[in-house]
Amino acid sequence: MKIIKQLVLVIVILVSRSSSAAAQDANALIQKVKAKLEKVNDYEAAGKMKTNVTFLKVPVATVKLYFKKPNKLKIKSEKGVSFVPKGAVNINLNNIISSGKYTILDAGTDKINGAAVRVVKLLPEDENAEVVLSTLYIDEANAVVKKAKTTTKENGSYELEMTYGKYIDYGLPDKIIFSFNAKDYKLPKGVTFDFDDGEAKKVEDKAKNKKGKAEITISSYSINKGVADAVFQ
Protein backbone atom coordinates (compact mmCIF):
# COMPACT_ATOMS: atom_id res chain seq x y z
CA MET A 1 0.00 0.00 0.00
CA LYS A 2 2.90 2.28 0.89
CA ILE A 3 4.49 1.60 -2.52
CA ILE A 4 1.25 2.53 -4.31
CA LYS A 5 1.06 5.82 -2.40
CA GLN A 6 4.65 6.56 -3.33
CA LEU A 7 3.95 5.82 -7.01
CA VAL A 8 0.90 8.10 -6.97
CA LEU A 9 3.00 10.85 -5.37
CA VAL A 10 5.69 10.47 -8.04
CA ILE A 11 3.09 10.63 -10.84
CA VAL A 12 1.53 13.77 -9.32
CA ILE A 13 4.94 15.43 -9.08
CA LEU A 14 5.81 14.52 -12.68
CA VAL A 15 2.46 15.79 -14.02
CA SER A 16 2.85 18.98 -12.01
CA ARG A 17 6.35 19.55 -13.37
CA SER A 18 5.19 18.78 -16.91
CA SER A 19 2.28 21.25 -16.62
CA SER A 20 4.59 23.90 -15.20
CA ALA A 21 7.11 23.38 -18.03
CA ALA A 22 4.33 23.56 -20.64
CA ALA A 23 3.03 26.81 -19.13
CA GLN A 24 6.53 28.32 -19.19
CA ASP A 25 6.99 27.16 -22.78
CA ALA A 26 3.65 28.73 -23.79
CA ASN A 27 4.62 31.95 -22.05
CA ALA A 28 7.91 32.06 -23.98
CA LEU A 29 6.01 31.55 -27.25
CA ILE A 30 3.60 34.39 -26.43
CA GLN A 31 6.57 36.65 -25.71
CA LYS A 32 8.03 35.85 -29.16
CA VAL A 33 4.74 36.70 -30.85
CA LYS A 34 4.49 39.88 -28.79
CA ALA A 35 8.06 40.93 -29.66
CA LYS A 36 7.30 40.61 -33.36
CA LEU A 37 4.10 42.64 -33.11
CA GLU A 38 5.88 45.34 -31.12
CA LYS A 39 8.12 46.08 -34.10
CA VAL A 40 5.10 47.91 -35.54
CA ASN A 41 4.40 51.34 -34.05
CA ASP A 42 1.85 52.22 -36.72
CA TYR A 43 0.77 51.32 -40.23
CA GLU A 44 -1.48 52.28 -43.10
CA ALA A 45 -2.67 49.42 -45.28
CA ALA A 46 -4.61 49.31 -48.55
CA GLY A 47 -6.87 46.47 -49.54
CA LYS A 48 -10.26 45.09 -50.58
CA MET A 49 -12.99 43.94 -48.24
CA LYS A 50 -15.68 41.44 -49.11
CA THR A 51 -18.51 41.01 -46.61
CA ASN A 52 -20.62 37.89 -46.58
CA VAL A 53 -23.84 38.03 -44.54
CA THR A 54 -26.52 35.55 -45.59
CA PHE A 55 -29.41 38.02 -45.63
CA LEU A 56 -27.63 40.99 -47.23
CA LYS A 57 -25.95 41.85 -50.50
CA VAL A 58 -22.95 44.01 -49.66
CA PRO A 59 -20.64 45.33 -52.42
CA VAL A 60 -16.90 44.68 -52.35
CA ALA A 61 -15.25 47.78 -50.87
CA THR A 62 -11.82 49.33 -51.36
CA VAL A 63 -10.57 50.03 -47.84
CA LYS A 64 -7.75 51.58 -45.86
CA LEU A 65 -6.72 50.18 -42.50
CA TYR A 66 -4.97 52.37 -39.95
CA PHE A 67 -3.22 51.23 -36.77
CA LYS A 68 -1.34 53.09 -34.05
CA LYS A 69 0.02 51.86 -30.74
CA PRO A 70 -1.17 50.87 -28.30
CA ASN A 71 -4.57 49.78 -29.65
CA LYS A 72 -6.00 52.23 -32.17
CA LEU A 73 -7.41 50.55 -35.28
CA LYS A 74 -9.71 51.97 -37.94
CA ILE A 75 -11.08 50.64 -41.21
CA LYS A 76 -12.23 53.23 -43.74
CA SER A 77 -14.03 52.58 -46.99
CA GLU A 78 -12.89 54.69 -49.95
CA LYS A 79 -15.94 53.79 -52.02
CA GLY A 80 -19.16 52.31 -50.80
CA VAL A 81 -19.81 51.11 -47.26
CA SER A 82 -17.61 48.89 -45.17
CA PHE A 83 -19.74 46.58 -43.08
CA VAL A 84 -17.70 45.49 -40.05
CA PRO A 85 -19.00 44.54 -36.58
CA LYS A 86 -18.51 47.29 -34.04
CA GLY A 87 -16.36 45.12 -31.80
CA ALA A 88 -14.19 43.71 -34.57
CA VAL A 89 -12.17 46.89 -35.05
CA ASN A 90 -11.23 46.71 -31.39
CA ILE A 91 -10.35 43.02 -31.44
CA ASN A 92 -6.88 43.02 -32.94
CA LEU A 93 -3.81 40.99 -32.04
CA ASN A 94 -2.01 43.93 -30.47
CA ASN A 95 -4.99 44.53 -28.20
CA ILE A 96 -5.19 40.86 -27.25
CA ILE A 97 -1.51 40.19 -26.62
CA SER A 98 0.04 43.53 -25.67
CA SER A 99 -2.66 44.97 -23.40
CA GLY A 100 -3.03 44.17 -19.73
CA LYS A 101 -2.08 41.10 -17.76
CA TYR A 102 -3.41 37.60 -18.31
CA THR A 103 -2.96 34.01 -17.26
CA ILE A 104 -1.44 31.86 -20.02
CA LEU A 105 -2.70 28.28 -20.42
CA ASP A 106 -1.12 25.72 -22.71
CA ALA A 107 -3.92 23.95 -24.63
CA GLY A 108 -1.81 21.56 -26.66
CA THR A 109 -1.64 21.41 -30.45
CA ASP A 110 -4.01 21.48 -33.41
CA LYS A 111 -3.87 21.79 -37.20
CA ILE A 112 -4.89 24.58 -39.57
CA ASN A 113 -4.99 23.63 -43.24
CA GLY A 114 -2.87 20.60 -42.44
CA ALA A 115 -0.14 22.60 -40.66
CA ALA A 116 0.55 22.04 -36.96
CA VAL A 117 -0.12 24.96 -34.61
CA ARG A 118 0.26 25.50 -30.89
CA VAL A 119 -2.92 26.36 -28.98
CA VAL A 120 -2.64 28.87 -26.14
CA LYS A 121 -5.45 30.38 -24.07
CA LEU A 122 -5.26 33.83 -22.47
CA LEU A 123 -7.42 34.65 -19.44
CA PRO A 124 -7.34 38.38 -18.53
CA GLU A 125 -6.61 39.00 -14.84
CA ASP A 126 -8.65 42.21 -14.86
CA GLU A 127 -12.27 41.31 -14.07
CA ASN A 128 -13.43 44.49 -15.81
CA ALA A 129 -11.59 43.74 -19.07
CA GLU A 130 -13.73 43.74 -22.23
CA VAL A 131 -12.12 40.49 -23.42
CA VAL A 132 -13.21 37.44 -21.42
CA LEU A 133 -11.15 34.74 -23.15
CA SER A 134 -8.80 34.51 -26.13
CA THR A 135 -7.68 31.28 -27.78
CA LEU A 136 -4.67 31.64 -30.08
CA TYR A 137 -3.50 29.15 -32.70
CA ILE A 138 0.19 29.92 -33.21
CA ASP A 139 2.66 29.02 -35.94
CA GLU A 140 5.64 28.30 -33.67
CA ALA A 141 8.33 28.44 -36.37
CA ASN A 142 7.33 31.95 -37.49
CA ALA A 143 5.92 33.20 -34.15
CA VAL A 144 2.66 34.43 -35.72
CA VAL A 145 -0.98 33.86 -34.81
CA LYS A 146 -2.84 32.06 -37.59
CA LYS A 147 -6.21 32.06 -35.85
CA ALA A 148 -7.69 33.77 -32.80
CA LYS A 149 -11.02 33.16 -31.11
CA THR A 150 -12.08 35.97 -28.78
CA THR A 151 -15.06 36.24 -26.46
CA THR A 152 -16.00 39.69 -25.15
CA LYS A 153 -18.48 41.00 -22.60
CA GLU A 154 -20.28 43.54 -24.75
CA ASN A 155 -19.56 42.77 -28.40
CA GLY A 156 -20.11 39.03 -28.70
CA SER A 157 -17.59 36.51 -29.98
CA TYR A 158 -15.25 36.89 -32.92
CA GLU A 159 -12.88 34.67 -34.83
CA LEU A 160 -9.94 35.94 -36.85
CA GLU A 161 -8.02 33.92 -39.42
CA MET A 162 -4.74 35.29 -40.76
CA THR A 163 -2.71 34.33 -43.82
CA TYR A 164 0.84 35.65 -44.02
CA GLY A 165 3.22 36.57 -46.84
CA LYS A 166 5.88 39.23 -47.34
CA TYR A 167 5.05 41.11 -44.12
CA ILE A 168 5.40 38.09 -41.83
CA ASP A 169 8.52 39.53 -40.17
CA TYR A 170 6.28 42.22 -38.69
CA GLY A 171 3.51 39.78 -37.80
CA LEU A 172 1.21 41.48 -40.32
CA PRO A 173 -1.10 39.31 -42.44
CA ASP A 174 -1.81 39.58 -46.17
CA LYS A 175 -5.32 38.32 -45.59
CA ILE A 176 -7.69 38.63 -42.63
CA ILE A 177 -11.05 36.93 -42.20
CA PHE A 178 -13.41 38.11 -39.44
CA SER A 179 -16.14 35.67 -38.45
CA PHE A 180 -18.96 37.05 -36.32
CA ASN A 181 -22.53 36.66 -35.14
CA ALA A 182 -24.75 38.72 -37.42
CA LYS A 183 -27.10 39.50 -34.53
CA ASP A 184 -24.38 41.78 -33.12
CA TYR A 185 -24.70 44.02 -36.18
CA LYS A 186 -26.49 47.29 -36.76
CA LEU A 187 -26.86 48.82 -40.19
CA PRO A 188 -25.34 52.29 -40.62
CA LYS A 189 -27.98 55.01 -40.53
CA GLY A 190 -29.31 56.02 -43.92
CA VAL A 191 -27.90 52.94 -45.63
CA THR A 192 -30.07 50.43 -47.45
CA PHE A 193 -28.97 47.01 -48.70
CA ASP A 194 -30.67 44.52 -50.99
CA PHE A 195 -31.98 41.52 -49.12
CA ASP A 196 -31.09 38.18 -50.66
CA ASP A 197 -34.64 36.89 -50.42
CA GLY A 198 -36.27 40.14 -51.50
CA GLU A 199 -38.04 40.60 -48.17
CA ALA A 200 -37.62 43.85 -46.28
CA LYS A 201 -37.66 42.30 -42.83
CA LYS A 202 -35.88 43.94 -39.98
CA VAL A 203 -32.20 43.08 -39.84
CA GLU A 204 -32.44 42.31 -36.13
CA ASP A 205 -35.01 39.61 -36.79
CA LYS A 206 -33.23 38.06 -39.73
CA ALA A 207 -29.85 38.12 -37.98
CA LYS A 208 -30.83 35.64 -35.28
CA ASN A 209 -28.55 32.59 -35.33
CA LYS A 210 -26.89 33.85 -38.52
CA LYS A 211 -23.17 33.97 -39.15
CA GLY A 212 -21.20 36.46 -41.19
CA LYS A 213 -17.69 37.03 -42.50
CA ALA A 214 -15.68 40.06 -43.50
CA GLU A 215 -12.68 39.13 -45.65
CA ILE A 216 -9.91 41.71 -46.11
CA THR A 217 -7.12 41.14 -48.63
CA ILE A 218 -4.21 43.52 -48.11
CA SER A 219 -2.26 44.74 -51.16
CA SER A 220 0.31 46.88 -49.31
CA TYR A 221 1.43 48.22 -45.94
CA SER A 222 3.20 51.45 -45.06
CA ILE A 223 4.85 50.59 -41.74
CA ASN A 224 6.18 52.98 -39.07
CA LYS A 225 5.75 56.07 -41.24
CA GLY A 226 3.46 57.82 -38.77
CA VAL A 227 -0.35 57.99 -38.59
CA ALA A 228 -2.13 61.12 -37.30
CA ASP A 229 -4.45 60.76 -34.32
CA ALA A 230 -7.14 62.59 -36.30
CA VAL A 231 -7.54 59.50 -38.51
CA PHE A 232 -9.12 57.60 -35.61
CA GLN A 233 -11.72 60.23 -34.73
Image (cartoon, grey):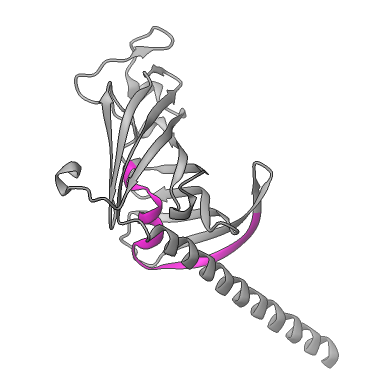
User: Does residue 20 appear to the left or right of 179 in the view shown?
Assistant: right
Measured from the top left, where is residue 137 in percent x and y? 56, 52
Q: Residue at x 41, y 36 (%)?
A: 218
Q: Quadrant of residue 230?
A: top left
Residue visible at 43% across and 36% down? 180
**Looking at this view, is 8 or 147 the one in front?**
147
Q: Position of residue 93 (x, y in %)?
A: 41, 52
- Look at the image and tell me in which quarter the N terminus lies: bottom right
On the rendered image, what quadrant is the C terminus found in? Answer: top left
Report x, y in % for residue 134.
46, 54
> Is 97 colored magenta in this rendering?
yes
Residue at the bottom extreme?
2
Indicate whether 48 appears above or below 16: above
Q: Tell me: residue 114, above or below residue 82.
A: below
Q: How many marks?
A: 0
In magenta, the rendered stretch is: 89-109
- As displayed, is residue 7 above or below residue 56? below
Residue plotted at (17% across, 47% down): 228
Q: Relative to the observer, which residue lies in front, 124 or 229?
A: 229
Magenta residue check for 20: no
Q: Residue at x 40, y 30 (%)?
A: 182
